[in-house]
Every structure is written in structure tokens, then in C-alpha cells.
Amino acid sequence: MGHNSFYVTTPIYYVNDKPHIGHAYTTILADVLARYHRLMGEATYFLTGTDEHGQKVQQAAKAHNVSPLEHCNNTVVRFQELWQRLGITNDDFIRTTEPRHTRIVQAILSDLYERGLIYSDSYKGCYCVPCERFFTERDLDDGKCPECRRTTIELEERSYFFKMGQYQDQLIDYIESHPDFIQPAHRRQETLGFLKKQPLGDLCISRPKARLSWGIELPFDRDYVTYVWFDALVNYISAIGYRSNEAQFKKWWPASYHLIGKDILTTHTVYWPTMLMAMDVELPKTVFAHGWWLVGDTKMSKSLNNVVNPMDMIDQYGVDAFRYFLMAGMSLGQDANFTEKIFVERYNADLANDLGNLASRATKMIERNFAGQMPPSAEIGDDERVLADLCLAAADNMAEAVKNMQLDSGLASVMATIREANRYFDKMKPWALSKAGDLATLGKVLRHTMECLRIASGLLYPCMPEKMTILRRAMGISEDALAPQLPRLRQWNILPEGSKVALDEALFPRAEYKEEAAKEAQTSKAASAKGKNKEKTAGKQDEATPAVISIAEVGKIKLQTAEIIAAEPIANSDKLLKLQVRIDQEQRQIVSGIAKFYSPESLIGKHVVVITNLKPAVLRGVESNGMLLAAEHEGVLRLVGTDGPIASGATVG
Ligand code: MSP
């Protein structure tokens, strides 16, 4: 089964999320691996897609006044367009709302039900609405959802359960006897720790339609839909022909890699393998859990307003630079830090100064001194040998790095060859050789430099396909060899004499990190956080504050409509209320000083206007993420709203 094939998957992304660098990272990683394996001549299949059922989609669709499927159709394009822009070469894109998927989920459910592996029972637990998950009291973290730290609600209902618990020992044995199944090793320990700590319970795989109708209907009970994770995980096999195209399924399964982020480890290393065991299907070869991209060492989150949008980076620095940064910047299983400053520093050091500069210097000298024709094959002295050995070793290192999921170290060894070639170039002083008319030595130096660039560009090709195509074309490599043949990256001195060399553009123009602009953005965030203090001094004219502000300054404050869905007093405060508001698909907690003017009950269902990019604050020990707008005059306070109904999350301004 699937021995000589490479099948790689990404998680299927929640369709109503906006893609961020976390999503981009996994998808680019899968793309680089797929491209590399294709170059190795392996039959390769790369799957990505979107997870389209569940409560959040249902709520968002309602807020936008469209059907859930229409909502999915509108939002799925964000991912599809980004993948296209990023040059992602996925072979398929699966959406869990497609009949080819829903049919298979239902067939699996029927089969497990008939075989007694799914049963009905009543269930009571703590339910987290945003995470769509039940937890036991024991799982809760200080009474809150262990995943998102929000308040849970107690819920009892009749449900259907998958007999996950009966596979506990089998799964432990499997993980222990297959060290590659969960990578990296510390994640394997995490899952084993979880499995050995307590008896594994059965998995609730249904949701009553009365509460959630947007899902795949259970084939044996029309009042229920399937739990989203049970539905979503099946994508990895429904897309490649499980129960619909046996030959295709056999070709690709078991998957070589399920690439996932560390937060979805349990679903992939406990739910999914036990589901497969019940179906009598082989387990994937490896579930690889990567770390998280942090922003300035902080978690990315909507409420902190620090989510990095890949499109912004691509617009400014180009697709390949972005791909390179993400691949070079994260090590096996560790978290990594993203800031624009770090991005620009690495871009300038690795791409503009080292690689771009070498390519430009070498090609220009060939254009000037050899009429743009590759100099002839030349002898290899000691200096050239050092360079050649390093380049040939880089090819081995990259192959190892791909095998061991250490792309960052593979890329680092390629960059080391570029730095060595720059040293070689400087040591040989080709400009002096040119001046002295020593064309033989000059030709040798340029040729060996180009050999380094040929190998490096081949090894970097899966990561930076656009720029490396330009570079390889510029060194006269024929069109059919632009995508490199890997064995040729293990040979030295093979560039054909006389091939045309011309590089018309700077591959990676130097970028400038605009510290001033970044500082300004920081200050504006801080200023909006100070809004609360200003309230206290209302009436006093702050001399530093100009009487008028520009439209750009107005634009820095993000105002959105919101609906109040819960309100409660805060202990020991006669002014503050703790509110839960819905802003589009997001639920937020806001502490507001309106207790004297509104009772908590009277606020439920009110449509208000909220500053949503205010820095979070803690008031009386309660976290607040935003500020409600209100008008106050002579002891009367009124919340600001809109003069007619409008979806929550609408921009005000
Ligand atoms: N729909 C589920 C996956 C189902 S797979 C059968 C899901 N979707 S998600 O859109 O929320 O997340 C997708 C992936 O993005 C996860 O692997 C998650 O770890 C990853 N990331 C989310 N934030 C991230 C970072 N800041 N950094 C890196 N990856 C992160 O979960």
C-alpha cells in the first residue's frame, strides 16, 4: 500500500477564519515537501481544503443573512486565492460540504453503527460554545474551557458515542511500536502521557439539530448531525477515494505526513487513529505537529490585534521571500517568532546581501567580460574544491533535512554555500583579474561561482520557485531543466560552455524596515488603550492633544457593531458590568462602566458600537477586550447604536 508514494496533507482550515501566517506556514511546508518529493521522482499527492460545518459557520451565516453554504462559498475563496498567490501546488482542495465527502462520512457512520461501535446514551457535561466541545468538570481549567479559557455552560442531552475507549491499549501499543507515528518526539510523549494518565472515554460524535443543524446528518437518526471533528478528519481519506475509488485509495494511503499545529494533536493522534482502527484502515505513517508562530513572543490573537496577514507581507516583500522566511525561521516542533523587523533583517541578510548580491555580481561580470556567455569548464584548485565540497554536501544535507523534517537546517546549509561563494569571490578579486586582462583565471572564478549558484538555486527551488526560475534562466539553464534534476545537483562543473547569461533584474532588492512607521502603529495602539484614563479627566483640555485630528488618525480606531449576548455584575463594583458581545463570528468579553444606568437583563440583545482594537485591560481582575461607546449628559447615559438592524461586526466609520 502506497509504499513508493508521498501523500502529504494540511489541516483543513475553518472556512470562516481569515488566513494568517499560521495557516500559510503549514500549507507552504506541505508545498515545499511536495515539490521536493516530485523532484525526487516520487508519485506525490498534496491535499488541503476547508472545514465547513459547525456552530461558528452557522452563526456567521445567520449574522450575514445568508445560508451556511452561501457563507462557505463566499469565504472559501480567501484560502483558495491565497494558495494561488503563494504558488501552492496542491493536487486537490477538499471542502467538507462536498457530496464526495459527506457521502463517505455517512457510509462510515452507518458501518460503525451497524457494527455496534456507535451507540446512543445520555450525556451531561460542560460545553464550550466557541470550541464546540464538551469537557468534564475535571478537564476544566479554573472552571473555564481548557482550550480557550472562556466560560462553559452545563448541558445534558441524548447523544451518540463512538467506542473510542476500547482502543486505548491498542493505540498505546501502536504508538510505542511505531516511533515515527507521532513526531517530533516530545509530542509523542505528550500523547502517550495523556493516554496513560486516565481511562480513555468514548467520543460523543453527534449534535442535536435543535442546537446545531449545520452538519452532516447522522444516517441512522435524522435529528442529529455529526460532530465536526469526526466529519473533518475523514477528509484525509474521502478525498483520495476511500470507499469510492479503491485503486486511487490504495495508491496514496497511508498518508506519509499529516502536518498539523500542536494545538490539534489530540484529535489527530487519539481520535483519528482510533477511528481508523474501528474502520480497519491502516494508520497514517506520521502525524507531524509543528510549533506556533508567535508575534514578538506573544500569541497571535484577534483581540490583541496582532494577527499577521500573509497578503500584506507578500505585497510588500514578494511571495518567495515570504515562503523562505517561514521555512527558514521555524525549527522542528518549536515555536518561532514573527515580527516585521526580524523578517526584514533576515530578508536583507540572506536574500538581498548574500544570494541576490552574488547572483548580480557574477552575472554582470560574465556579461561584461565574456559577452554574456558562460566561460569554459575549468580546473579545480584548492579554493574551488572547498566551495565544491560545501555545495555537494548541501545537496546531501537538504535531502536529509527533507527526510527529517528539518527544512530550516537544509536551507541554512544552502545559505552557507552562498556565503562561502561570496568569500571565494572576494578572495579571488575578479574585478582585478578583469583589469589585468587575465581572462582564463577570471573565467574560472566566475564559472565556479555560477556552479555554486546552480546547485543552490536547484536546492532552493522548492522553497522559492519563482525567483529560482528567474535565476536559473539567467544562468543559461535550458527551459526543461529549470525545475532541477536532483542528481545534477550532486555534480560539479557541468554548466554548458557558451550558454547565455543575463540577469535583468535585482532578484531581491534591499528592503527597508520602517521603524518610524512601526513605532507610530505601536503608539496609536497605546494611545487608544489610554482612552479609559481620558474618560476620568473628561472636561480638562489636554494641551498635548491637538483640537483637530486627521482622517488617518480617525482610521486608527476600529469601530464595529456588536450584539450584547450576556451581562452580569462584577463583585465589589457598583459601576462595572461584565458583558459578552458578539462581533461577527467572534465572542468577546468587555467590562463597561454602565452598571448605574442599565440592569444586566435590559442589555441582552442590544446592538451597540464597540472599539475593537483597544489594547486588552484587566479591571477588577476581569479581562476586558474593547470598549462600548456611550453618550453621557447631566447624569444620563445612553449606549450608542445604529438606527436600524445591521449584522454584528459591521465596520463603523
Ligand atoms: N479545522 C481544524 C482542523 C481540522 S483538520 C481535520 C482547525 N482549523 S484552524 O483553521 O483553526 O487551524 C488550522 C491550523 O492552523 C492548525 O494546525 C493550527 O495549529 C494552525 N495554527 C493556528 N495558529 C497558528 C500559529 N500562530 N502558528 C502556526 N500555526 C497555527 O483547527
Image: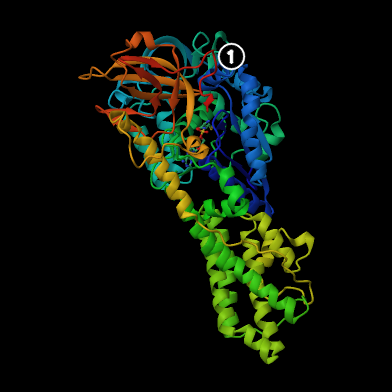
Q: Residue at x 79, y 73 (%)?
A: 499
Quarter of the image for residue 508 reads: bottom right
Q: In this rendering, does residue 330 appear at all?
A: no
102 up-or-down from 273: above or below = above
Q: Left or right of 616: which side holds 459?
A: right
> Where is the N terminus found, in terms of image quarters?
top right
Q: In this rendering, does residue 434 appear at all?
A: yes
- Point out residue 100 in the picture as x, y percentages from the top left corner: 68, 25
Q: Residue at x 67, y 68 (%)?
A: 454
463 up-or-down from 561: above or below = below
- Point out residue 397 in the picture as x, y percentages from the top left corner: 54, 63
Q: Foreground residue, 185 or 371?
A: 371
Q: Foreground residue, 466 or 592?
A: 592
Q: Residue at x 57, y 70 (%)?
A: 418
Q: Left or right of 617: which side holds 168?
A: right
- Point out residue 313 in the picture as x, y percentages from the top left corner: 56, 48
456 up-or-down from 121: above or below = below
- Residue type, mark 1 in image: Glu
- Count the numbered circles shown: 1
Q: Foreground residue, 315 or 634?
A: 634
Q: Left or right of 152: which side holds 494?
A: right
Number of other residues with Cα within 10 Å of mark 1, as a class: few under 14, some 14 to 19, many 20 or more:
many
Colouring of the image: rainbow
Q: Residue at x 56, y 69 (%)?
A: 393
Residue ID for mark 1: 217
Quarter of the image for residue 606 reads: top left
| Disc 1, SS | strand
